[in-house]
Amino acid sequence: MTKTMSYYPGCSSQASAVHLDTSLRAVMGKLGVQLRDVEDWNCCGASVGHIEGGHLGQAALSGRNLANAQAAGGEDFVTPCAACYLNSHYTNEKIRENPTLKAQVNEALAEAGKSYDGGLHVRHACEVIVNDIGVDKVKEQVTNPLTGMKMAGWVGCQTVRPFANTERGGTWETYDDPSFLDDFIAACGAEAVPFKGKTKCCGGSVSVMSPDKTLHLMKDILDEVKASGAEAVVTPCPLCQTNLEMYQPQINKAFGTDFNYPVLFYSQVMAVAFGLEGKTDAALHQHLIPPEALLSKAK
């Protein structure tokens, strides 16, 4: 049976993480989830929204997306982006529990003829896969197992913190030693190598603005990837993926290293393992560092 969910792709889906968006849509269709895009969605503000927008401005941005989703139907509101999830889930919960904030957000939304009552449930795409679909269902879809591949599951610092181990967050994962990526990788037939750096921070948006301040953070992650024996990194986070892939040449120049690791999205790994097409479904052509081993297994 197909389940429909309101889908908020977020800004990165239009550019740096188009391969996450493309592959997730393909994978969710195979797993029985229909993603219905939130109409006329806007940026959630992400990290930089806090710099100038203030708390109410930030809440109004997410509130508008939630209002649009609720107007189209009452399905759960799902997003694949860590930052989008943090902002949207946080705002939703605060609107539900704080009448003053709810009134302020609705005052702002009223200027555009919109309103939101806090009635939706905001969820991360990975939590939906774990709790609603189940890893066994993922395994059932595998027709092209990724036997012999070694992958390091790098969750990053935001996807599971602070909401993953809360009731409204789905109580689907621990903060400090998450296992869902390892489970996804193993379900696809690859080996999830032991990886100590799975929740280390890449510097986030600071890396985008001032990479000189964060290259050492990314080097630490890549050092542990190398020590693990992995041939590729797998992550759920758009900004993590962009930073760790994009800055490897700069890290090599600064530290005399020779890193050249593809950084994949879990949904791309699933798409290939599901026997879907490597370009149109898994979007493997979107990488700066070509994932040669996965490309060789793709249809």
Image (tube, grey):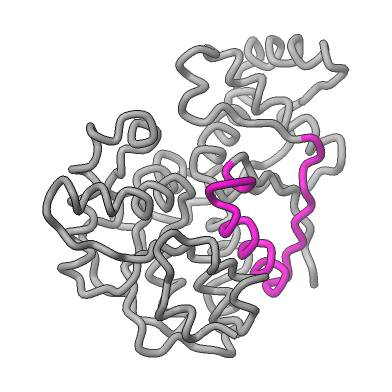
Q: Quadrant of residue 276?
A: bottom right
Single out the residue that lies furthest toward the left.
256
Image quadrant containing the C terminus: bottom right
**Residue 45 drawn above or below residue 146:** above
**Residue 186 drawn above or below residue 175:** below
User: What residue is at 61 percent from the left and 65 percent from the top?
Assistant: 23
Q: Which residues are magenta?
A: 12-40
Query: Where does the image place residue 169, in percent across and percent down from the top left?
Result: 52, 45
Give left or right: position of 249 versus 234: left
Image quadrant containing the N terminus: bottom right
Query: Where does the image place residue 95, in percent across and percent down from the top left?
Result: 64, 23
User: What residue is at 81 percent from the left and 39 percent from the top?
Assistant: 39
Query: Where does the image place residue 270, in percent across and percent down from the top left?
Result: 54, 74
> Does the segment drawn in magenta span residue 25?
yes
Seen from the viewer's position, the closer of residues 156 and 71 is 156
User: What residue is at 34 percent from the left and 52 percent from the top?
Assistant: 244
Q: Quadrant of residue 140?
A: bottom right
Seen from the viewer's position, the closer of residues 12 and 129 is 12
Seen from the viewer's position, the closer of residues 153 and 92 is 153
Give left or right: position of 278 versus 249: right
Single out the residue that lies furthest toward the front.
253
> Does the segment drawn in magenta span residue 287?
no
User: What residue is at 54 percent from the left and 81 percent from the top?
Assistant: 273
**Residue 65 drawn above or below residue 187:** above
Query: Where does the image place residue 128, in percent across and percent down from the top left?
Result: 60, 58
